[in-house]
Amino acid sequence: MEYHPQPARSEPELIEELDLLLRSAVKSELISDVPLGAFLSGGVDSSTVVALMAAVSNAPVHTFSIGFDETSHDESRFAEEVAHRFGTRHTQLTVRPGVWSSVDQIVRQFDEPFADASAIPTYCLSRLTRNHVTVALSGDGGDELFAGYDRYRDFFRKRILYRIPGPFRRSAAGTLSNLLPRGVRGKRFLRSLTLDRFDDYVWGDAELWHGDLLRPDFLASLPDTDPTSPARGVFSAALPSELDALCLHDIELYLPDDILTKVDRMSMAVSLEVRVPLLDHRVAEFAGTLSPSIRLRGRIGKYLLKKLLERYLPPEMVHRPKQGFGFPSGGGLDMSSERSCSTPSHRIASDLWASSARRR
């Protein structure tokens, strides 16, 4: 991935170019001799893929989503709204508390430590989808290419605090952080202020739990190397902007070592092929020409991609708060509540150290 900002182009021109590129990417991924569908969470990325599938396909699109009874994790109502809007044949699975019958199988698929708990709902979604189709399109890559993660915004929002002299900032923030119990709101934020800005982005509060999770003898056996050195290599590169550095870090490390690994292992476990049109090389090359302000504008991440999606969905559906793909981990999994909605009408280095940095 290379960043080469191009001369200023108007917003309508950029939206039109992105629309054409994504249409072409989606159309090429629809070539298949077997049944094909799409993961649909109702978020910007998957909704964009489904919108363009509906636009270039002559047949109804098959979409699949999972939901939870816990409203803090449930996006199913948003997925249903999008499915209804584009007239898809939508199938939804509600994952409810039960037995953890699938966890051993999920762990075996990675064959190494993998600390992203969203592998579990990804497996549930893949298994649901494979019951109906053989190939699925997903929206993976949109956050990394177009600056959609909240952590990008938070990085710049804390810039003023990093103007405080380092020794004073680290001492004050560290003292206040130590006074707060584990899990209290604000503790992680204070902890982050004791770190360098880029260390905060990569490492975060991982040191808070290393001592609890990993045995001292295991920690002592690890090589005397800096586990964040790959990230430091990215951040030390000459790039046009700090946002480019953050996005490149996630494109080169987080995306392949967590997101794509997770989806590949969980989908292949059930013999489902997943395709990622947002990562088409033409789309990635286009993203590399965009200025930071057209990707992250104020508090709006994925600004350009959202403006494109406004062509297909009402603004209130496009600009709802971002919700990550996780699951309520307090109970087990019971994958037995599938229902179809017939309308005329889806993220860590594989070693444990790098994976601990993916906390947002």
Image: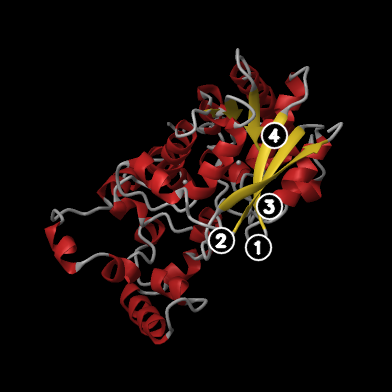
Labelled disc at residue 63: 4
Name the residue nearer the viewer: 254 or 311: 254
Q: Position of residue 185 (x, y in %)?
A: 52, 76
Alpha carbon separation for disc pair 1 and 3: 10 Å
Alpha carbon separation for disc pair 4 and 3: 14 Å
Label 2 crowding class (10 Å Cα cut-off): few <14, some 14-19, many 20+?
many
Quick check: 245 above or below 137?
Answer: below
Quick check: 22 above or below 161?
Answer: above
Name the residue nearer the viewer: 277 or 241: 277
Q: Earlier in the sequence, mark 1 or mark 2?
A: 1
Q: Earlier in the sequence, mark 4 or mark 2?
A: 4
Specify the amino acid type for callout 2.
Answer: Pro
Labelled disc at residue 91: none
Q: Position of residue 78 (x, y in %)?
A: 74, 48
Query: Mark 2 and mark 1 in contact (Cβ < 8 Å)?
Result: yes
Name the residue nearer the viewer: 58 or 202: 58
| Element assignment for label 4 | strand
Q: Which residue is mark 2?
A: 328
| Element assignment for label 1 | loop
Specify the amino acid type for callout 3.
Answer: Glu
Alpha carbon separation for disc pair 1 and 4: 22 Å
Any part of residue 135 in sight: yes
Residue that appears at 25% across and 64% down? 214
Labelled disc at residue 75: 3
Q: Position of residue 206 (x, y in %)?
A: 35, 64
Q: Is residue 69 left or right of residue 268?
A: right
Q: Earlier in the sequence, mark 3 or mark 2?
A: 3
Any part of residue 238 in sight: no
Tag nearer the camera, 1 or 3: 1
Q: Which residue is mark 1?
A: 70
| Element assignment for label 3 | loop
Q: Earlier in the sequence, mark 4 or mark 3?
A: 4
